[in-house]
Amino acid sequence: MRIVLLGAPGSGKGTQAQRLQARHGVPQVSSGDLLRDAVARGTELGLKAKAVMEAGQLVSDDIVLGLIRDRLSRPDAAKGFILDGFPRNRDQANALSALLNAIGQPLDAVLLLDVRRETLMQRLAGRRICPKCGTVYNVHSLNGVTTCARDGTELYQRPDDKEDVIAKRLEVYEKQTQPLIDHYSKLGLLRVVAGEGEFEAVFERMEAAALTKPVPAAAVRVSAAPVSTKKTVATKKKTVSTKTQPKKSRTAAKSAKRKATSKPAKRAVARKGARKVAAKRASTTAAPKKRSVKTASRSKSARRKK
Ligand code: ADP
């Protein structure tokens, strides 16, 4: 699995990437996490990146590329990777493609998590994170709790999750990262995933999109069997005959016809089920008769004894 996750800040790329990593054993490579780690360790690179990140701007391509190149050269990335937050502009996309071609590991797919702007704002402004285990919460569901449910650590707000910085990040996304949607779409790599709704449902869609193999056009064979005239006539006949019925039964006949044509398999199953129920009913109704015969004979002999 060699994939890129595209999506606005707050679209859920990080959370979904973590889950994909846990399920498929392929590492999540997050440019944001690599940068935050450099900032926390106070490296030269981290010191350069800190102010840029806190202003919601993009860190220079050479810094980010250096981090990504190092990370992808680690042994665990040999079996694949989930790139989260990288690439973020055309130059980074070109650099990535050159890097992957050089190591003979081209991308399988690019997954775009599609989320409305108002949802993004709500998620980002309310986001609180546990500094110890990384669990992400939202103030709207915390009900005043300020500590992590797992380890009791005080939660914090990312400095770039302040409202004015969020607006800047979304603007940068629209200008610099959104053009990548078109870029990857033209390369035939883009898959769009609806990113709102229950976490599990979004994850299922992500996973399906990540695992689907594209089919080359040359391998697609669409059967073009002509529709049999017999069938057409039969359908026409049915349509005509319903008109001769009263309106109520015509509607019923139409809906029955719709059901018959659209879900024949379901109907067959339903018929089978009905037959089973009928058979069961027949056997259970037979049982009390037997019992009542026995009861009757017992009471007869009881009467004899008396
Ligand atoms: P989000 O996607 O929610 O904005 P990230 O953790 O991916 O959060 O990124 C946080 C910040 O790190 C970005 O606002 C930006 O300053 C910097 N950053 C992350 N990835 C890149 C990148 N590929 N290129 C440049 N800057 C980046």
Image (cartoon, rainbow, N blue to C red):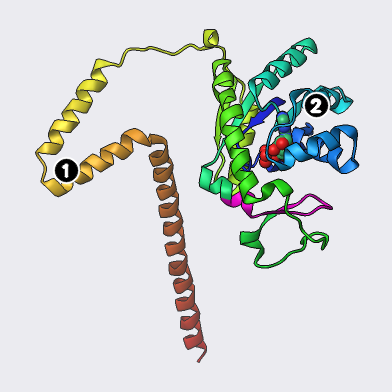
Q: Quadrant of the N terminus?
A: top right
- Of residues 13 and 61, the one drawn nearer to the viewer in this rendering: 61
Q: Residue furthest top?
A: 218
Q: Is 27 on the left or on the right of 279, as rendered?
A: right
* Residue count near mark 2 (Cα–Cα under 10 Å), binned few <14, some 14–19, many ≥20: some
Whether label 2 lies within 8 Å of ligand 1 gets the answer yes
* Residue at x-position 82% and y-position 63%: 152
Q: Is residue 31 magenta?
A: no
Mark 1 vs mark 2: in front: 2
Dividing the picture into quadrants, the one containing residue 205 is: top right
Residue 210: in sight, yes or no? yes
Q: Which mark is residue 185?
A: none
- Of residues 209 and 225, the one drawn nearer to the viewer in this rendering: 209
Q: Which mark is residue 250?
A: 1
Dividing the picture into quadrants, the one containing residue 23 is: top right
260 over 211 or under it: above or below? below
Q: Residue 76 at x, y = what percent?
A: 85, 28
73 over 152 or under it: above or below? above
* Residue at x-position 23% and y-position 21%: 232
- The reply to whether dot 1 and dot 2 touch (C-beta < 8 Å) is no
Q: Residue 165 at x, y = what percent?
A: 65, 45
Residue under label 2, please give it.
63
Amino acid beneath label 1: Arg
Ligand 1 quadrant? top right
Q: Residue 258 at x, y = what percent?
A: 29, 37
Q: Earlier in the sequence, mark 1 or mark 2?
A: 2
* Residue count near mark 1 (Cα–Cα under 10 Å), binned few <14, some 14–19, many ≥20: some
Residue 204: in sight, yes or no? no
Amino acid beneath label 2: Ile
Q: Is residue 123 magenta?
A: yes
Q: Which contiguous range is marked in magenta?
A: 122-136
- Of residues 68 and 239, the one drawn nearer to the viewer in this rendering: 68
